[in-house]
């Protein structure tokens, strides 16, 4: 009997040790993911299970967390917590920005503030006087030192006759009244006339240099306070000495939805997109001081008719975002501020909590997806991630970006452009505290501290080799495991079948290999499901001739 020597089938081998994230493009790279859950991008290039969310405590409806410098802030009801310490800051229920300027913590559109010493209050102030007889506020012309001239001014168009040194004359012969003082036969103009308004408690809520509005007098209007003490204020004006009734002094702050701090100022804008506002230098309460000096407050109208969606200080500039525009504010003071607009993908409406800086780059969620912005033009980061999300919140921890639309929590590697689904529980807001991710889901606070739980990953279909002469006949999975794992396959669109299962009983993570023979196919999907600590390190691919 003659025995024939059979040829050993030729096999070609390859190894995959870089695994990509979610990618729904038609030309997605091999071994990118079609779907995932419980998978983190933190250990790229591996496919790895991640930690789970653990409930920390219940909160009130509308609660949210946010980054406040290097700390995390939490708003629940009318309470502000920083490092678990409570602060007396009043909230309106629709707070959209909480920022820090020096030691002060400020909320908008609430226009309230507090500090770590427990001092709190409103950015705005108002004081009204009563009508009661001689207790009415008294107006008097004063010197630059705040001293009364001791003279009652003469008001008229003609120069007073028989004047003495120190006599005052309010000259009304021109379009504007001019205060003059008599000295050695001549009436000289006082170029900076001052009026002192005296009344018990009138200046207690105000400070020197603040812009206020005064009503109920013949000189109603906007003024910058030259002095402010408990029982008087001084303004730049001309008015004959007199008593007046029922006057009101107000310090107001613009309606602001989005705010940030930069160079010891607050920069803000309202959602309606009509204007930007900047407080006076170092004065969080002062938004209406316009004296032509470097420390002035500032405002500028924006006339494109579109809504603002966020603002953020970045580098040496402040940026105001709309959905399709980015406004850049350049300069260091009102005299050289320039507001420049460019058409570019901005922050998507409702995604103001997605804006953050990481490694010198500004990231945010736009109508086109996540963007990386270096100050020139934004670039899309995760090109393979095509999900269209709403109300995105984001933050970073280590080398990982976490973001959520309230429905799912995603883990992303911005350097490699990798996104995975870490949890099917999302958050309305995210922030980091002491190296731990925190998020709000519903009315509860969760922290990413739980042990690795269940996970799943489905790879995009793998097709035949382009030559048509080879097919994938075997795969070998190399993985680390402390838990359980199942490998399921779907041939040519059929239902998934389990081809490998393993439950690691070791209390530590150990390395394993799973060899899997494959049948002939046109396309193949691989699904990994399991629980516990898992990392897919490599896939060995064995191709056989047809």
Image (cartoon, rainbow, N blue to C red):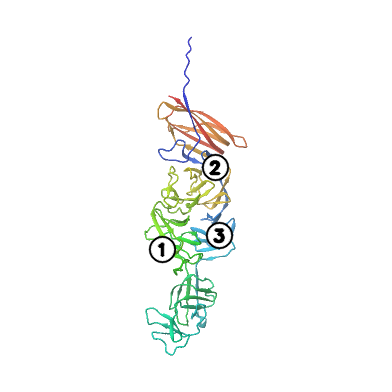
Which numbered mark, 2 or 1, is in the foreground of this view?
1
Residue at figure coordinates x 51%, y 29% from the top left: 516
In primary-sequence order, the first of circles 3 and 1 is 3
Q: Secondary structure at mark 2?
A: loop
- Up/down of 518 relative to 122, above or below: above
Q: Which residue is mark 2?
A: 50
Q: CA distance from mark 2 to mark 1?
A: 47 Å
Q: Circle 3 sits in a helix, a strand or a loop, which is it? A: strand
Look at the image and tell me whether residue 543 can be seen: yes
The residue under label 3 is 79
Residue lying furthest front: 184
Q: Which mark is residue 471?
A: none
* Residue extending furthest toward the bottom: 162
Front residue of 251/491: it is 251
Q: Is 267 above or below relative to 199?
A: above
**CA gap, disc 3 and disc 1:** 34 Å
Q: Is residue 131 depicted above or below 379 in this figure?
A: below
Residue at numbered disc 1: 300
The residue lying furthest to the top in this view is 1
Residue 40: x, y in percent?
A: 52, 42
Which image quadrant is residue 301 in? bottom left
Mark 3, Cα crowd under 10 Å, few <14 / some 14-19 / many 20+, is: some
Would you call the spot at circle 1 few (<14 residues within 10 Å), some (14-19), or many (20 or more)? few
Vertical order, 278 against 379 (above or below): below
Q: Position of residue 337 (x, y in %)?
A: 43, 62
Q: Quadrant of the C terminus?
A: top left
Q: Earlier in the sequence, mark 2 or mark 1?
A: 2
Q: Determine if residue 59 is in view.
A: no
Query: Which tag, 3 or 2, sits closer to the chain's start?
Result: 2
């Amino acid at each position: 009997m003659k025995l024939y020597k059979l040829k050993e089938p030729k096999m070609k081998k390859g190894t995959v040790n870089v695994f990509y994230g979610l990618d729904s493009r038609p030309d997605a790279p091999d071994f990118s993911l079609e779907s995932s859950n419980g998978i983190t991008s933190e250990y790229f290039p591996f496919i790895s299970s991640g930690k789970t969310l653990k409930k920390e405590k219940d909160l009130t409806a509308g609660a949210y967390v946010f980054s406040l410098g290097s700390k995390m802030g939490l708003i629940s009801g009318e309470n502000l917590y920083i490092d678990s310490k409570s602060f007396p800051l009043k909230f309106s229920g629709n707070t959209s920005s909480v920022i820090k300027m020096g030691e002060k913590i400020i909320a908008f559109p609430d226009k309230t503030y507090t500090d770590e010493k427990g001092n709190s209050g409103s950015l705005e102030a108002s004081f009204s006087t009563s009508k009661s007889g001689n207790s009415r506020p008294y107006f008097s012309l004063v010197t630059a030192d705040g001293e009364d001239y001791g003279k009652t001014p003469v008001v008229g168009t003609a120069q007073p006759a028989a004047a003495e040194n120190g006599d005052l004359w309010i000259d009304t012969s021109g379009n504007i009244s001019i205060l003059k003082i008599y000295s050695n036969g001549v009436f000289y103009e006082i170029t900076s006339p001052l009026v002192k308004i005296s009344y018990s408690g009138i200046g207690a809520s105000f400070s020197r240099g603040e812009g206020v509005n005064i009503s109920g007098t013949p000189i109603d209007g906007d003024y910058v306070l030259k002095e402010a003490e408990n029982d008087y204020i001084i303004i730049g004006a001309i008015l004959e000495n007199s008593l007046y009734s029922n006057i009101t002094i107000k310090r107001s702050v613009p309606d602001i939805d989005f705010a940030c701090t930069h160079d010891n100022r607050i920069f803000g804008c309202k959602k309606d997109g009509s204007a930007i506002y900047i407080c006076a230098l170092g004065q969080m309460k002062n938004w209406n001081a316009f004296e032509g000096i470097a420390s002035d407050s500032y405002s500028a109208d924006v006339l494109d008719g579109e809504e603002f969606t966020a603002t953020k200080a970045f580098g040496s500039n402040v940026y105001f975002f709309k959905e399709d525009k980015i406004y850049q504010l350049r300069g260091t003071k009102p005299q050289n501020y320039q507001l420049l607009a460019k058409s570019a993908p901005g922050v998507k409406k409702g995604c103001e909590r997605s804006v953050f800086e990481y490694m010198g780059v500004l990231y945010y969620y736009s109508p086109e997806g996540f963007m990386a912005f270096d100050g020139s033009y934004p670039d899309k980061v995760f090109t393979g991630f095509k999900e269209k999300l709403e109300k995105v919140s984001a933050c970073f921890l280590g080398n990982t970006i976490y973001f959520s639309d309230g429905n799912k929590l995603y883990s992303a590697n911005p350097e490699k452009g990798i996104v995975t689904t870490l949890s099917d529980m999302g958050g309305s807001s995210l922030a980091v505290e002491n190296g731990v991710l925190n998020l709000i889901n519903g009315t509860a606070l969760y922290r990413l501290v739980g042990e690795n739980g269940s996970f799943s990953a489905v790879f995009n279909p793998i097709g035949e080799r382009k030559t048509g002469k080879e097919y994938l006949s075997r795969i070998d999975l190399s993985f680390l495991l402390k838990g359980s794992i199942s490998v399921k396959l779907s041939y040519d669109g059929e239902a998934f079948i389990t081809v490998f299962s393993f439950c690691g009983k070791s209390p530590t993570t150990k390395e394993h290999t799973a060899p899997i023979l494959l049948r002939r196919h046109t396309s193949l999907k691989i699904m990994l499901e399991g629980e516990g600590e898992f990392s897919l390190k490599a896939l060995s691919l064995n191709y056989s001739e047809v």
